[in-house]
Amino acid sequence: MTFPAVTVAQSCATRAVACRRLILLRHAEADFLGRFCGHSNPGLTVQGRAMLPAIIQCLSLAGCSPTVIWSSDLKRAQETAAPIAKHFGLFLATSAGLREMNFGSWEGLTWSAVERQYPEDARAWIERFPHHRPPGGESFLELQARVITELESLAERAESGSVIAVTHAGFIRTAIGWVLGMPDTRISRITQYHGAISVLENFATHWSVAATNLSVSGMPQPNGEGGEARL
């Protein structure tokens, strides 16, 4: 089941009404590469911390003038967001609603380990997606409902202008898929690199995707999916 979103073809630059621009930034590279990392709370890797100056420069060169910086309350997102907030001289607010999907008992495991330790759940995840949830975790539909609620809340609080939200790959894929009306089973086709930027625009009840997966390096990342297993 996919909740409907109304999209528009015109960008903020061509609309005469108040526009709210949500800049969704995937956190920099974190530990747990190649393993399910949803509500687990590792920090950034050395490589991830080294990405932060380039992320800030990318936002600055793009002419980004945010009115507020939001972050998932997980460490890897906050460690990415804090220097961005400092650069723009803005208070950093956090929200648990911006978290990655909760993978429950699968947290910290590779997919191969999940297949060995939870074979029935692994099969159900594939066969019954988006309805099945990992043991103790969230289903995709529960994540989707949370993402929609969080997007609408951010848009309401933004009033007008730009908001940067530092979040996670699953959250961003789900947001883009909802706005575009994609079937749930195709959400995993949306790539999100560490430190990459996607942009949603909101006009009252209308949403559109202005940009997706803008990498600070401009090049594909071999381990771009590593920190959080794909939905």
Image (cartoon, helix red, strand yellow):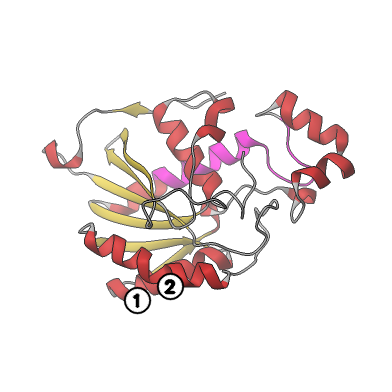
Classify 10 Å Cα crowding around label 1: few (below 14), some (14-19), many (20 and above): few
Range drawn in magenta? 132-152
Give the residue number, with chain letter if any, for mark 1.
86
- Secondary structure under the numbered disc 1 in the rendered image: helix
Q: Amino acid at mark 1?
A: Lys
- Specify whether residue 147 is painted magenta: yes
Residue 225 vertical position relative to residue 77 in the rendered view, above or below: above
Are discs 2 and 1 less than 8 Å apart at CB? yes
Q: Is residue 66 left or right of residue 142?
A: left
Classify 10 Å Cα crowding around label 2: few (below 14), some (14-19), many (20 and above): some
| Magenta stretch secondary structure, dominant | helix
Q: Residue at x 49, y 72 (%)?
A: 49
Does the rendering let one see residue 28?
yes
Residue 130 vertical position relative to residue 153 in the rendered view, above or below: above
Q: Amino acid at mark 2?
A: Ala
Across and down, in percent, residue 153 comes to 41, 48
Across and down, in percent, residue 10 comes to 19, 32
- Specify whether residue 111 is painted magenta: no
Does the rendering let one see residue 65?
no
Across and down, in percent, residue 79 comes to 50, 71
Q: Which mark is residue 201?
A: none
Give the residue number, with chain letter if any, for mark 2.
82
Image quadrant where residue 114 sits: top right
